[in-house]
Image (cartoon, grey):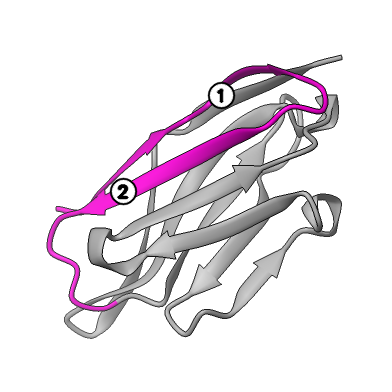
């Protein structure tokens, strides 16, 4: 059973920083990558950043230059360093583990989500 445990959310003033962590546990032989999504009230869930097993990185345009995704392969952990936070970054942030191979099928897994609130 694959589990994702997120930490690091909270309340911060605009211009501040937070660092999110997501640790994956369970039987994971192969996967394509990990990433972060977010969902603000009344909005669809959107990609924030993701990193593949080949270290290919994608960012949403709205966070480029402010957020940095990284990973620790030995710990199956992905991080999201968020700097220069803005009120519009307020959302629930979800960790995603994608492309997990189980037999001949690929699966995606999601964390429970961690709240990030940026006050103006």
Give the residues in magenta. Answer: 1-30
Q: Is residue 106 left or right of residue 55?
A: left
Q: Is residue 10 left or right of residue 104?
A: right
Which of the labelled discs sits on residue 115, or is there none?
1
Mark nearer the N terminus (1 vs 2): 2
Q: Nearer the viewer, residue 112 or 9?
A: 9
**Label 1 neighbour load within 10 Å: few <14, some 14-19, many 20+:** some
* Residue sitting at x 71%, y 30%: 40
Which of the labelled discs sits on residue 35, or is there none?
none
Decide: is 54 above or below 119: below
Magenta region includes residue 11: yes
What percent of the width, then of the height, locates residue 92? 59, 30
Eye-nearest disc, 1 or 2: 2
What percent of the width, then of the height, locates residue 91? 67, 29
* Residue sitting at x 62%, y 25%: 116
**Label 2 neighbour load within 10 Å: few <14, some 14-19, many 20+:** some
Quadrant of the rendered image containing residue 105? bottom left
Number of callouts: 2
Q: Is residue 33 left or right of residue 60?
A: left
Inter-mark Cα distance, 1 to 2:
17 Å
Secondary structure at numbered mark 1: strand
Picture quarter with the C terminus: top right
* Residue sitting at x 25%, y 58%: 75
Magenta region includes residue 118: no
Secondary structure at numbered mark 2: strand
Q: Nearer the viewer, residue 83 or 29?
A: 83
Quadrant of the rendered image containing residue 33? bottom left
Proximity of marks 1 and 2: CB atoms separated by less than 8 Å: no
Q: Nearer the viewer, residue 119 or 36?
A: 119
What percent of the width, then of the height, locates residue 8? 47, 30
Quadrant of the rendered image containing residue 58? bottom right
Which of the labelled discs sits on residue 23, or is there none?
2
């Amino acid at each position: 059973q694959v589990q994702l445990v997120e930490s690091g959310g909270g309340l911060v003033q605009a211009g501040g920083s937070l660092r999110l962590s997501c640790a994956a546990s369970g039987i994971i032989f192969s996967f394509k990558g990990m990433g972060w999504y977010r969902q603000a009230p009344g909005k669809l869930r959107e990609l924030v950043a993701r990193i593949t097993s080949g270290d290919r990185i994608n960012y949403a345009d709205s966070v480029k230059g402010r957020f940095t995704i990284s990973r620790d392969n030995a710990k199956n952990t992905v991080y999201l360093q968020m700097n220069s936070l803005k009120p519009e970054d307020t959302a629930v942030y979800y960790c995603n583990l994608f492309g997990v191979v189980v037999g001949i099928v690929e699966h995606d897994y999601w964390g429970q989500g961690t709240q990030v609130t940026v006050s103006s």
